[in-house]
Image (cartoon, rainbow, N blue to C red):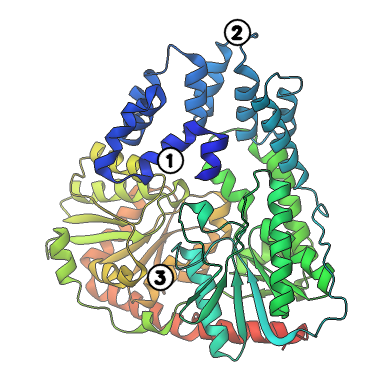
Amino acid sequence: MVRHITDDPVRALTLGWRALPAPLRGWLRLAGPYGRASALWGAGDKRSALGSLERRPARLAAFALAVDQPQVARSALARLPGSSAARPVLAARLAYREGRLDDAVRELDGAPGGRAARLRATLRAEAAMLEPGTLKSRSKRNGSPAPVRGRVLHVVTDGLPTTSAGYTVRTQEIALAQRAAGLDPHVATRIGFPVTAGHIDGRFEVAVDGVPYHRLLPWVMPGRMDAIAATQLRHASKLVDSLKPAVLHAASNYSNALIAIALREAYQIPYVYEVRGFWEDTWLSRHAGTAGLESSDRYVRSRALETHCMTTADLVVTLGEAMRAEIIGRGVDPDKVIIAPNGVSEEFLTPLPDGAALRARLGIRPDEFAVGLVSSLVAHEGIGTLLEAVKILKDKGVPARALIVGDGAERTALAHRAAELGLDDAIFTGRVPMSQVREHHAALDAFVVPRTPDRVCQLVTPLKPVEAMASGLPVVVSATSALTEIIEDGVRGMSFPPGDAHALADRLRRLQADPALRAELGTNAREWVARDRTWKHNADRYRDAYARLGAV
C-alpha cells in the first residue's frame, strides 16, 4: 500500500475502498473525483464509476489503469492531445500494464517533469532486474565457522502470522514438519514485510508455533526494484552470517531465488528452488482477454528468468507431476526435480466437527445442498461457473445453496453476478481464520474447485482441495491437468470441463441424489491423503534432498 500511495495515488484509493471497514467506505466520496469513482467502483457500479470521469480523458485513463481496464485507458488516451503533459506517464503506465517494458521506458524519453523522470528510472530498474546475474553479493564467508548441519534458511515472500494463505500455510507446515524430523528450519520474509503490506509490526523476529520468522526491516524502504533487491541481499547476508545455515531454500518467485543464488555464490551454500507456481502464467491469467501478453517483454523475460533460477539450482522442488513435466521441459535435469506435494497436518484427518450450528447461523436449511469452496476470490478460480451451476440446479428444483468462503479482488463482482442470476441467498463469508476452515468444511455437502482452463490452472495444484479431501468431502474439480491428477475422476472425486456450468450442475446433481456416492468419494479421498499427502511425508522427502547436498 505504501508504494501505491507514492507511485500511483489513484490505485491507492481503489485499494483503500477494499481495505476500509464498510462504515467508512463512503468517506472516499469526499476525496475528489477519483474518490467518488473509487467508491462507485468498489460498490460494483463500474459503469457509473467510469462515466463520472468521462469528460476528463486524462483522469479517466488514470482511473482505468488503476482498476485494470486497459481498453478504456487506451480509448481515453486517444482523446488526449499530443501536447498533453499527462500523456507520457499515462502511456508508459499502459505499456507497463500490457507487459511492454521497453515501450514503457521509450514513452518517457524526453518527457518533462520529475514524476516522468522517476517513473522512467523505476521502469528501467525493473527491466534490468529481469536479467540473470544482475544481483551480486559483496559478502564472503572468509573462513567463518562452518554451516550448522541440518539448519535450513527458507527465503519466502510473506508469512504467518500476518498473512494467511495457501503459500504461507505451506511454508509453516513444511517448517513444522522439518522440525519434527530433526531439522532446524528458519524463515526469512521479503524486505520490508510486514510493514510494506500495511501491518505496523517492527519486530525483527517472531516465532509461530516455535518456527522463527526473521523480518528484514530497513530503516528506509527504497522504491526502485534494483535498490530493493540490493537492500534485501544486504540484510539477508547479515542473517546468513548469524545463522550459518547449511542449505538455502527459496520459494517462488524469482525475486526470492535471486537472493538465494547470490548468497550461494558468496557463502558456498547449496541452493534449493521450490517452484510453487509459475508467476508469469499467473500474471497472464489475471489479464485474460488481453491479446499479445505471451509475447510481451515482461512475460518472455520473466519466464526466462524463472527458468534460469530452476536450471542453476542444486535441486528443484515442486508440487505435482504436471509442474515437474513443465520444469523438465524447460531444460532442468530430471534427476534434480523432486515432488513435495501440497499436504495436510494430522488435524485435517480427524473427523469433522458438527456443521449444523454453522449452517444454522448462515441460514442454510437442513434440506439444502450446500456447495462451495474456501479460496482466494480471483478470476482464474472460475467461481462464476459455480454460481451458474447453482442457478441451473435451482431451476431444476434442487434445493442448492452456494457458500463462498474467502476474499479477493473478484468478491464484489461475484456478489453482483450472484444477484444477476437471482441467487440472493448465495453466501459470501469473506476471509475466515485458518482455525475456522474445518468448521466451514463441515457446513458443505460438496467442495467445488471450478478453475478456468488458463495455463496456470493446468499446471499448479492448489492446497485447498487437498484439505477438503482430507476432511472427507466429495470434491468436484474442473478437468485441468493439475487437478485431475489428484482426484482421479470417479475415484477420489469428480471432474467436469472447465467453464461448463451445465456439466458441473450435472455432477452436483448426482452427488445430491446419492449420499452413498458422496461418502465413497470422500472416504477414498481421505485415505489417499492420509497415505500420500501429509506434511510428515514431505519432511522425509526434504531431509533426503538436503542429504544429497551434504547439508544434513
Q: Which secondary structure lies at badge 2?
A: loop
Quarter the C terminus occupies = bottom right
Viewer can see residue 342? no
Q: Is residue 38 above or below residue 442?
A: above
Q: Is residue 528 above or below residue 402?
A: below
Q: Is residue 109 above or below residue 315?
A: above
In the picture of the structure, the residue carrying the numbered disc 3 is 490
Residue at the image position 15 percent from the left and 70 percent from the top: 357
- On screen, residue 448 versus residue 91, left or right, reads left
Q: Disc number at residue 290? A: none
In the picture of the structure, the residue carrying the numbered disc 1 is 15
| Total labels drawn | 3
Q: Which secondary structure lies at badge 1?
A: helix
Q: Is residue 435 above or below residue 202?
A: below
The tag earlier along the polypeptide, 3 or 2, is 2
Residue 124 percent across, percent down from the top left: 75, 37
Residue 445 percent across, percent down from the top left: 25, 67
- On screen, residue 334 versus residue 294, left or right, reads right
Q: Which secondary structure lies at badge 3?
A: loop
Query: Callout 1 environment at 10 Å: few (<14), some (14 to 19), or many (20+)?
Result: some
In the picture of the structure, the residue carrying the numbered disc 2 is 81
Query: Callout 3 environment at 10 Å: few (<14), some (14 to 19), or many (20+)?
Result: few
